[in-house]
Image (tube, grey):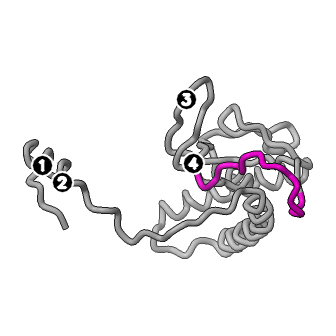
Amino acid sequence: VGPTSVNAPPKAKSFSSTAPRSDERMPSWWSYGSMQISNRQGFLRATTLVDPYHVALFGGLTTTVDDSGALREVDGWIELRGPRPTLRALARLRAAMERFIHLRVLEPGGAGPEGSRALLREVVSLLGTAAPRQERICASLPESLTQHVEMPPPLPPHSLRRAREAGGGGKTG
C-alpha cells in the first residue's frame, strides 16, 4: 500500500509511549486501482480492504473443489485454507448462489424459490460475522483524517483551454 495512503501501515516510531505495541501482522486482501513500482518497491494506489469471505464466496471465475467437496482454490491461484466442513459449506454456498442467479436471469420478475431466498438470508448473516474481523484489521491500520467530498474540484484553467482547443467545447457544470 502506498506510503501516503490512508491505508498505509504506520511508520516505525520510538516506543517510549504508553500505547500498546503489536508486532502481530494480520493477513488481509486488498483491491487496488493501480500499482506503481519505484526503487524496487511496489506501491498500491486506490486501495480497499476486502474480507476473505468476499473472496471465497464471490471472487474469481473458476474454482477447484477436492474429492470431499471442499473449496480449495479460486481462479487457479487463490488457495483457501480452513476446516474442511467450512470449505465444503463455502463450495455449496457458491454453487447455490450461482444456481439462484441463473434462475433470476431466466425469470427476472419472479421471487425465486423459497429455499434460494433462505440461502441468501444465510449468506447475509454469514457476511455480518465478517464485521468484527474487519474492525480488528481496521484497528491495526493507522488513523487518518478523511473528508467526504460531494464533488470533485473544478479543472484548472489550463485544462479547460486544452479541452476547448481539442474540440471539447470547454463547458463546465
Write down the quadrant of residue 136 in the picture.
Answer: bottom right
Give the amino acid type for the residue marked by disc 2 in the picture. Answer: Pro
Characterize the local packing of mark 2: few (<14), some (14-19) or many (20 or more) Cα atoms within 10 angstroms.
few
Predominant SS along the magenta part: loop
Sequence order check, earlier mark of 1 and 4? 4
Question: Viewed as shown, does residue 160 lie left or right of 138?
Answer: left
Distance between the Cα atoms at labels 4 and 3?
Answer: 15 Å
Question: Which residue: 59% across, 41% down?
Answer: 61
| Label 1 close to label 4 by CB (< 8 Å) | no
Q: Which residue is mark 3?
A: 37
Query: Is tag 4's residue or tag 3's residue first in the polypeptide sequence?
Result: 4
Q: Is residue 10 magenta?
A: yes
- Depth check: 15 or 132 in front? 15
In the rendered image, residue 127, in percent from the top left (x then y), is placed at 73, 66
Residue at the disc numbered 1: 161
The image quarter containing residue 37 is: top right
For the residues bearing labels 2 and 3, Cβ distance under 8 angstroms: no
Point out which mark residue 4 bears. Answer: 4
Q: Earlier in the sequence, mark 2 or mark 3?
A: 3
* Mark 1 → mark 4, Cα distance in angstroms: 31 Å
Picture layout, residue 5 above or below residue 73: below
| Sequence-earlier tag: 4 or 2 | 4
